[in-house]
Image (cartoon, helix red, strand yellow):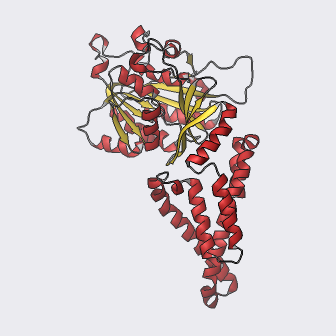
């Protein structure tokens, strides 16, 4: 029952602990003791019947191994079940489940000191801002206002803690998954905006729309936007799919997290005239790949950064080959990747992509820093524009027309990719 209390105290120090040591220290102080004591308690229960058969030393080892195996098994079984219902009730949140577990432990281990545990539980329930109640949200907003933010909505979901916040001082709205920003837009609408589109606060999302600017092999016979189809994997706040829909492109959105899609629709005006598939992208692509009668796509947008990391399974050769199969012969795919360009992991991702899509060009969100001869870090968002694997022509872009900007100043300045990355950087 002390785990939530420790988390509350560590949360206050999260800024000073940083993204590297913060999670490590939190897990050492909370999850590790809980796991150790759980295994120990289960092992003690199992040890007595094993003593007669194996002796004390062997009985201790066998009981501990069995206890750990049972806990891991239950964890694997419950993972999917919890994902299916997480966030649907206040007690089905990460904080709520911790309190539920504490209550179960208290009931299973009766003690005369249970009254102290009840007092501690009452205090935690009254002060823990992670519990999604109206009273806690009000108290949380009073703190956020000091930083010029206001909490609009929040809910636990299968990819993490999803929240929508307004910056009152500067006038923008963002969606977060845990500590990661899924996207944001300015609250004011440009005077000439098409379909009420608002300005994105990140250039990278407008750059993804440049799939439309890649010159086609079809020449003058190229289809109009209204005759084209797009697949968007990962909705975020809906910046890119909203633009594609506004241009008349038939758009299918695959999003694993129903809360992210709902918040994009409710708080960021994602248009309803699209095909929404709430499903993990791997199974969707595999199903469409097997169904040869399904139409293929002119454009695919691969934008799946969430929860502080890129899902590795969506950057494998198998998955990327599936996307290649879903592209039409003249199709274009845009893949967004956030990472440190100097790390081997980024080279691995880029080379994996190019092993499936040989005809690619890479662009970063902003110009590389100059004046640093041997930088030790170069973190950025980048987009890889690639043709279908069987295509023979290289990637080149047409100049955007005024209609491509949709009345947006951000698109006018950032739609056409500018800062190309030398492929030799990745070997």
The front one of 93 and 223 is: 93
Q: Residue at x 55, y 65 (%)?
A: 72
State which quarter of the image contains the C terminus. Answer: top right
Q: Left or right: where does residue 344 sit relative to residue 301?
A: right
Q: Residue at x 48, y 18 (%)?
A: 189
- Residue 333 in sight from this viewpoint: no
- Residue 418 in sight from this viewpoint: yes
The front one of 206 and 374 is: 206
Name which quarter of the figure residue 326 lies in: top left
State which quarter of the image contains the N terminus. Answer: bottom right
Q: Left or right: where does residue 268 sit relative to residue 25?
A: left
Tell me residue 205's x, y (percent). 50, 25
Q: Residue at x 68, y 67 (%)?
A: 117
Residue furthest bottom as drawn: 52
Name which quarter of the figure residue 342 lies in: top right
6 up-or-down from 238: above or below: below
213 up-or-down from 175: above or below: above
280 up-or-down from 249: above or below: below
Tell me residue 214's x, y (percent). 41, 17
Residue furthest left as drawn: 293
Q: Left or right: where does residue 34 sit relative to residue 175?
A: right
Tell me residue 223's x, y (percent). 28, 17
């Amino acid at each position: 029952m002390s785990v939530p209390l420790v988390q509350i105290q560590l949360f206050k120090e999260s800024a000073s602990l940083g993204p590297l040591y913060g999670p490590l220290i939190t897990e050492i102080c909370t999850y590790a003791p809980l796991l150790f004591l759980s295994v120990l308690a289960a092992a003690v229960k199992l040890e007595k019947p094993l003593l007669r058969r194996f002796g004390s030393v062997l009985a201790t080892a066998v009981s501990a191994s069995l206890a750990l195996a049972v806990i891991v098994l239950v964890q694997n079984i419950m993972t999917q079940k919890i994902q299916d219902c997480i966030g649907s009730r206040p007690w089905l949140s990460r904080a709520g489940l911790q309190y539920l577990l504490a209550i179960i432990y208290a009931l299973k281990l009766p003690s005369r000191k249970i009254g102290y545990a009840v007092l501690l539980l009452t205090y935690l329930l009254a002060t823990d801002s992670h519990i999604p109640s109206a009273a806690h949200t009000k108290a949380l907003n009073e703190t956020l206002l000091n930083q010029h933010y206001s909490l609009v909505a929040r809910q636990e979901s299968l990819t993490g803690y999803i929240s929508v916040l307004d910056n009152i001082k500067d006038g923008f709205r963002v969606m977060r998954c845990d500590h990661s920003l899924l996207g944001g837009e300015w609250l004011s609408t440009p005077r000439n905006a098409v379909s009420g589109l608002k300005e994105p606060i990140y250039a990278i999302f407008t750059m993804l729309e440049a799939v439309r600017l890649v010159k086609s092999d079809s020449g003058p016979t190229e289809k109009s936007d209204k005759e084209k189809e797009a697949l968007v994997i990962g909705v975020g706040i809906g910046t890119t799919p909203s633009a594609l829909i506004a241009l008349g492109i038939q758009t299918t959105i695959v999003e694993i997290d129903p809360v992210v899609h709902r918040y994009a629709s409710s708080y960021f005006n994602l248009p309803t005239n699209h095909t929404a598939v709430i499903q993990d992208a791997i199974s969707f692509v595999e199903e469409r790949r097997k169904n040869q009668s399904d139409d293929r796509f002119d454009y695919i947008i691969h934008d799946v950064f969430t929860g502080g990391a890129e899902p590795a399974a969506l950057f494998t050769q198998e998955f990327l080959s599936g996307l290649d199969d879903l592209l039409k012969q003249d199709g274009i795919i845009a893949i967004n990747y956030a990472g440190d360009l100097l790390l081997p992991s980024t080279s691995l991702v880029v080379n994996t992509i190019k092993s499936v899509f040989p005809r690619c060009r890479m662009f970063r969100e902003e110009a590389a820093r100059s004046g640093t001869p041997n930088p030790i870090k170069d973190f950025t968002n980048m987009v890889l524009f690639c043709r279908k694997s069987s295509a023979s022509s290289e990637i080149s872009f047409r100049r955007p027309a005024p209609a491509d900007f949709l009345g947006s100043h951000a698109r006018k300045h950032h739609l056409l990719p500018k800062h190309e990355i030398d492929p030799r950087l990745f070997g």
